[in-house]
Image (cartoon, rainbow, N blue to C red):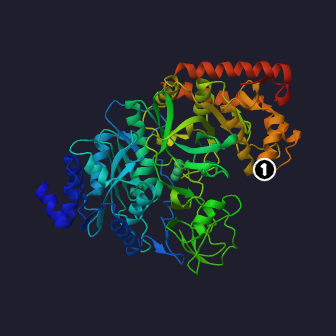
Amino acid sequence: MRENLRARLGPEMWERLKRITNPQVHEFIDFFVSLCNPERVFISTDTDADIQYIRESAVKNGEEIPLATPGHTAHFDSYFDQGRDKKNTRILVPPGENLGPFIETLDRERGLSEIYELLRDIMKGREMYVLFLCLGPARSPFTIPCIQITDSSYVAHNEYLLYRPGYEEFIRRGDSFTFFRFVHAQGELDERKTCKNIEKRRIYIDLEGETVYSVNTQYGGNSIGMKKLAMRLAIRRGDREGWLTEHMLIMGVRGPGGRVTYFTGAFPSLCGKTSTAMLEGETIVGDDIAYLRNIDGEARAVNVERGMFGIIQGVNSVDDPIIYKALCTPGEVIFSNVLITEDGGVFWEGKDAPMPERGMNHSGTWFPGKKDEKGKEIPPSHPNARFTISLERLENLDPHLNDPLGVVVSGIVYGGRDSDTWPPVEEAFDWVHGIITKGAALESETTAATLGEVGVRELNPMSNLDFLSIPIGRYIQNNLDFGRTLKKVPKIFSVNYFLKDASGRYLNEKRDKRVWFKWMERRVHGEARAARTPTGLIPLYPDLKRLFWEVLQKEYREEDYVKQFTLRVHENLQKIERVTKIYREKVEDTPAVLFEVLEEQRKRLLAVLEQYGPYVNPFVFETVST
Ligand code: OXD
Ligand code: MN
């Protein structure tokens, strides 16, 4: 085997690979070199020269188009490849394994033979890039070494912007260690260098081999192995080893006297996760994926990434000044599915710039009013258009990004796209109440981050449903257990940025979330009071009035407080009914405590309904100090 691989790599690349002594690495690469049959193999050693080679290849291959601003490039995915493909993303399972109705699965043997067939000779005439990377900071208990094989220099380029290099780590770890494996192939490309065989798009996750296959797709959420694909492998590993992989931002919130308190936050895609991580005046550790471990009784979290694959729609200089600056100044940025203007700039919806008259986008040449085959108007940029940047570009980057032990988590926040039920901010009574009523009961309206209809309200436990690789009940149980083993248990909160009044108007401004985080920070330190409602603990009006003034210099009116924090009893009862029904009817392994906690909440709501009616003024609730 080695002889064959050696011959395929040639002396220079073989020398590079040889320094890694783990025979499993050699076997893995050998297998896929033989199967995919590339013309050349590039073993990357993470040096500046190697990364530069990948950047240049992306432009030379036509996968990225250089723009006028130095360091900026733009990439297009096929018109039909603009989001995560949930239907064709399958967990491969052995006969008899059942992951429940929300997780798409496929028989392992069948899936592997299908994917091997699709991969056979798929890289003929192409270059294969082999990258060694790390999820998490180097030399940390959180670190997971990974190999990404891809024939897309765009994917390879993204991996280097988003993840930490790992070639030296692979050498350092010696002969025997496990690693995650990702194999991606674009398949046939059209003249615009986008995937042609979308109907054969497949993303198969083999838990047993800790390997993910992704074929006939380029969209980052389907193709960049370390991102959403690795989450499934990590959830499985964490399940075995007792730690959590969460779809969560990590941020530092500043409190009085210069203290910084760390929060994680779970929000479904396109529900304000990145803008929360980027809150003015606070610091960002990560905006998408956190691993959480119990280290000496403390909940510690790391960002397993070091870059951002962010949604660009709506990014503007007023709401997102720091990202906006990074996107509009020289430096490395990969734009995907935005509009390239005739002067080599970019435009996206919501940018503070006039709409161009023409340009090039994911549909080809674009002009205002252009329609697709179905008569649907094509916007200048796709709602799920993205940018990739290194977190190092951000002025608000937290100094602990690369800390091997991560940060201590004091608060966990859950939020979804909810127009009518939850108040803007609320604290759970305790860990179990929070995990159940805030995390496991999280609902959100679907968005453009996945293919399919948008605006449909769906249950999305911990905003992690799309990435689960273990049965939901077990995942919820793991979350419950995690809190039980901690000496210092984080507080759990919910936020709702999308609450509307009866006429459909948002009840809050975008910037109000800065106040909710300051209130939560004070709660963590026992420095703010709260009112006890049937669903949790809400802020008191005088505290918010003061914080609104301190943080935003905004006059916060009592009538606004009343509208925002009115308890919507029927809506909450309906939510409990919807959520309970799903867990009762569809999820076989729901922990019994979930039903108990929701039932207690239902009873509290019914008692309040009887006393005060369906809309309850927040001033009626009793004040508690801690
Ligand atoms: C993402 C997503 O790309 O959740 O972060 O879709
Ligand atoms: Mn995400």
Please give the name of the residue rendered at 56% of the width and 61% of the height, measured from the top-left corner: 385
Mark 1 Cβ and ligand 2 under 8 Å apart: no
Q: Is 413 left, or right, of 207 in this rendering?
A: right
42 lies left or right of 142 = left
Question: Going 79% across and 46% down the picture, which residue do you hit?
Answer: 550
Q: Position of residue 488 (x, y in %)?
A: 55, 27
* 494 vs 460, nearest the viewer: 494
Image spot of residue 309 (x, y percent): 51, 56
Count of labels shown? 1
**Where's residue 141, x and y in %?**
39, 38
Farthest residue in the left direction? 3
Can residue 457 be seen at all in this image of the molecule?
no
Quick one: SS at disc 1? helix
User: Residue at the bottom extreme?
Assistant: 343
Tell me if I can see residue 602 in this picture.
yes
Residue with the mark numbered 1? 552
Question: Would you place residue 504 above or below residue 196 in this image?
Answer: above
Look at the image and tell me in which quarter the C terminus lies: top right
Q: Quadrant of residue 321?
A: bottom right
Q: Does residue 596 lie above or below 490 as drawn?
A: above
Residue nearest the viewer, comparing 416 with 193 = 416
Q: Residue at x 41, y 65 (%)?
A: 154
The amino acid marked with disc number 1 is: Leu
Quick one: label 1, few (<14), some, or many (20+) residues within 10 Å? some
Looking at the picture, how far across and down is residue 593, in whole percent?
A: 56, 19
Return the residue found at the far front: 257
Vertical arrangement, residue 19 with respect to residue 48, above or below: above
